[in-house]
Amino acid sequence: MPVLGMGGLFFRARDPDALAAWYARHLNVGAGCVSDPGATPDEWAWKPQGGPMVFAPFRQDSDYFAADKAFMLNFRVADLDALLADLRAADVEVITKAEWDHPDAGRFARIHDPEGNAIELWEPPAPAA
């Protein structure tokens, strides 16, 4: 029987409550958050909008994200410019590089949560008309 999708992402944090609050406030991610139109908030789960999800182990010596971190989060977003404006207004450092963007792959930006975990923000390319 095949796996149906991600059921959760669990990781250690120095201050789990503060980190959960940061993700909910700045990214609308975490318990009680809803991204899927028509979904009902749930005290335990985030209700994300369906779509593609990349599952890709990286080489141990990759420099795509910090060597001292075992993972990097990637969140699919609908309006990268608006989100980046909100993050900058909240004094969250935003990193963009022209070479990260490609018409076939979409646009990317990088931020870090308060515990230093890398978060890649990905706006997929618009569907062909």
Image (spheres, rainbow, N blue to C red):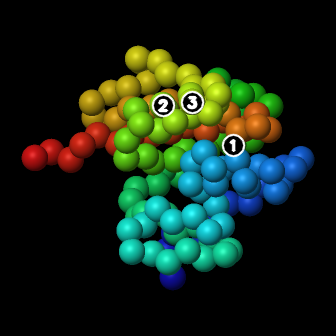
Image disc number at residue 71: 1
Which residue is the site of mark 2?
85
Name which of mark 1 and mark 3 comes first in the sequence: 1
Which residue is rendered at x = 38% and y = 68% of the image?
Answer: 37
The crowd level at tag 1 (other Cα within 10 Å; few <14, some 14-19, many 20+) is: some
Place residue 122 in its image quadrant: top left
Q: Secondary structure at mark 2?
A: helix
- Residue 47 coordinates in the image, percent (x, y): 52, 69
- Residue 94 coordinates in the image, percent (x, y): 57, 26
Place residue 126 in its image quadrant: top left
Which residue is rendered at x = 39% and y = 59% of the image?
Answer: 51
Amino acid at circle 2: Ala
Which residue is rendered at x = 66% and y = 67% of the image?
Answer: 31
Which residue is the site of mark 3?
89
- Looking at this view, name the residue that lies furthest to the right: 14
Vertical comparison of 109 with 17: above or below: above
Vertical comparison of 44 with 111: above or below: below
- Residue 36 coordinates in the image, percent (x, y): 42, 66
